[in-house]
Image (cartoon, helix red, strand yellow):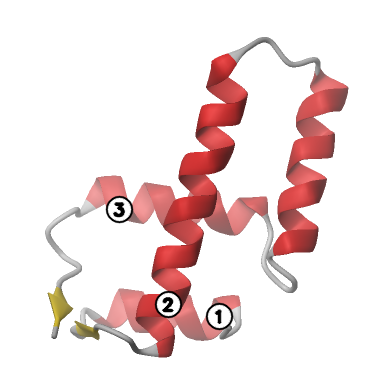
Amino acid sequence: MIDIKEFLEYMESGKIITCGSKIHECMHWFSQEALRLTAELNGSYHTPQEIRVLNGIADRKAGRCNIQFVSAFLYQLWKEPLHWSLQR
């Protein structure tokens, strides 16, 4: 997996994302992780401590990535959903 800085720079560049590329793989992983965390958090009540634990799990799963990145990813996706395109 690529690091956060490289991923964000590529996404901000507006370049086409090629299916099967490292960028595509990273984008897919983060989107799935964001969906999983959203479902977990929205599915039932969680104390602030439980939310911190969930965020900590996300930090460890992502290696150098963290929950702030997942949030940034979702923000960018909602901000300009048609900006990112996939090319086969």
Q: Could you say which is closer to the camera, residue 81 or residue 28?
A: 28
- Could you tell me the amino acid type at mark 2? Glu
Distance between mark 1 and mark 3 Cα atoms: 17 Å
Residue 45's place in the image compared with 80, above or below, is above
Give x and y (percent) for residue 10.
36, 83
Label 3: which residue?
77
Label 3 or label 2, whichever lies nearer to me, is 2
Image x and y of residue 68, in percent: 62, 52
Q: Circle 2 — which element? A: helix
The residue under the point 87% across, 24% down is 49
Quadrant position of residue 42: top right
> Marks 2 and 1: which is nearer the front?
2
Label 2 – label 1 distance at C-alpha = 15 Å
For marks 3 and 2 on the same chain, the one whose residue lies earlier in the sequence? 2
Write down the residue under mark 1: 5
Looking at the rendered structure, the secondary structure element under dot 1 is: helix
Q: Are marks 1 and 3 in contact (CB under 8 Å)?
A: no
- The residue depicted at 35 percent of the width and 78 percent of the height is 24
Tell me the residue at 51%/29% (across/down).
39
Residue of label 2: 25
Q: From mark 3 to mark 2, how far is it between C-alphas?
A: 16 Å
CB under 8 Å between discs 3 and 2: no
Q: Amino acid at mark 1?
A: Lys
| Quarter containing the C terminus | bottom left
Specify the label residue 64 is tagged with. Answer: none
In what quadrant of the picture does the N terminus appear?
Answer: bottom right
Q: Is 17 left, or right, of 39 in this rendering?
A: left
Q: Are marks 2 and 1 in contact (CB under 8 Å)?
A: no
Which label's residue is closer to the chain start, 1 or 3? 1
Local crowd size for mark 3, using a 10 Å CA cut-off: few (<14), some (14–19), many (≥20): some
